[in-house]
Image (spheres, rainbow, N blue to C red):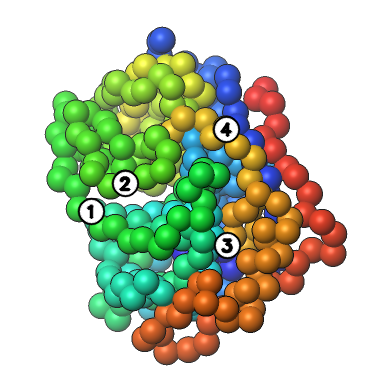
């Protein structure tokens, strides 16, 4: 998914480094802001990363949560071809279907419970359109920052449909990394965790996690207590490194759905602007110029019935660094 804000803010991010179990005092509750995906009938996404309170959880640098979206009312998703550098996009749906086309020549569909991961290292472009059969669109779109040694890697695309893993009180689909005895085969460039967790009504579930990871729990549906902190729909709870277990409690009388993200603290500074991740202002300027001039860097998306997205104007100053503030 593109970051299609008219005035795209720049972000420069650094690592946050802070056995046992996480407690409520160690949970930061992040609330989202609404961002329209362009046009008068735009569908709106709820963005929890990046924000002033936190810009990275492991290598996760972008979290958009959308729906349930009535496609008949909003027109659904229609994101024209747009570029990416220095990142991987992670598409995960709860309902609906999205047609994906990219400059690698991949024509694929994003469906509920199936991971589509696209790598745009040196450069890639793609389009995303909800299909005509979609009535309700609902899911998350996530970005992962690539480390320096891999940020110019070649274009790639991976698809994976994880089998549900049953534990007492929950059903888990692990799409990246390892959790609850299940390992995803999907290749990443830094240690990561990504999993959808469905919690039964009133369930309390304790999951063993890597103490070297920091974690974020996004609540899609329900009210969930994470390590004692209460999280409502669209909120993201963050815990630092050090815990070897996370306890999740479904406070509702119906199913709760969450997405658990994790990873080792990202030990590099990055600059993120529009759909580009670089290491300097000059990286961003160069990527924008090459997209605007239709250079070979990003390739061509075939089959989309319309023009590609133009890049927004750069700010009138050198892109300033911005990192995570100290945790309170």
Residue corresponding to mark 2: 187
Q: Nearer the viewer, residue 90 or 299?
A: 299
Residue 255: x, y in percent? 26, 41
Of badges 1 and 4, the one in the foreground is: 4
Q: Are marks 2 and 1 in contact (CB under 8 Å)?
A: no
Of badges 2 and 3, the one in the foreground is: 2
CA–CA distance in space, label 1 to label 4 = 28 Å
Q: Residue furthest right?
A: 317
Residue corresponding to mark 3: 275
Q: Residues within 10 Å of mark 3 (few under 14, many from 20)?
A: many
- State whether residue 46 appears in this view: no
Residue 129: x, y in percent? 39, 75
Q: Are marks 1 and 4 in contact (CB under 8 Å)?
A: no
Mark 1 element type: strand
Residue 137: x, y in percent? 35, 65
First in residue order: circle 1 vs circle 4: 1
CA–CA distance in space, label 3 to label 4 = 21 Å
Residue corresponding to mark 4: 267
Q: Nearer the viewer, residue 56 or 145?
A: 145
């Amino acid at each position: 998914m593109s970051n299609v804000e008219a005035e795209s803010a720049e972000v420069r991010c650094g690592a946050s480094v802070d056995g046992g179990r996480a407690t409520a005092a160690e949970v930061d509750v992040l609330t989202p802001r609404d961002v329209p995906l362009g046009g008068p009938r735009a569908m709106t996404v709820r963005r929890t990363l990046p924000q002033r309170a936190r810009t990275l959880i492991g290598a996760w640098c972008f979290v958009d949560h959308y729906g349930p979206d009535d496609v008949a009312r909003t027109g659904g998703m229609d994101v024209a071809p747009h570029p990416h550098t220095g990142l991987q996009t992670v598409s995960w749906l709860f309902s609906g279907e999205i047609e994906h086309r990219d400059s690698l020549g991949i024509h694929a569909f994003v469906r509920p419970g199936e991971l589509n991961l696209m790598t745009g290292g040196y450069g890639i472009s793609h389009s995303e359109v909800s299909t005509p059969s979609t009535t309700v669109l609902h899911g998350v779109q996530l970005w992962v920052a690539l480390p320096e040694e891999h940020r110019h890697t070649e274009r790639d695309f991976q698809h994976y449909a994880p089998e549900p893993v049953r534990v007492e009180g929950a059903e888990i689909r692990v799409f990246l990394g390892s959790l609850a005895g299940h390992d995803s085969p999907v290749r990443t460039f830094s240690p990561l965790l990504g999993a959808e967790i469905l919690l039964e009504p009133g369930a309390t579930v304790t999951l063993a996690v890597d103490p070297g990871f920091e974690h974020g729990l996004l609540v899609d549906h329900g009210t969930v207590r994470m390590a004692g902190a209460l999280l409502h729909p669209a909120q993201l709870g963050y815990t630092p490194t050090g815990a070897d277990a996370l306890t999740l409690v479904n406070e509702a009388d119906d199913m709760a759905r969450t997405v658990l993200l994790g990873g080792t603290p990202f030990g590099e500074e990055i600059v993120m602007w529009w759909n580009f991740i670089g290491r300097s202002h000059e990286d961003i300027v160069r990527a924008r110029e090459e997209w605007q001039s239709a250079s070979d860097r990003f390739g061509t998306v075939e089959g989309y019935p319309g023009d590609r997205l133009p890049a927004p104007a750069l700010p009138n100053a050198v892109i300033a660094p911005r990192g995570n503030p100290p945790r309170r």
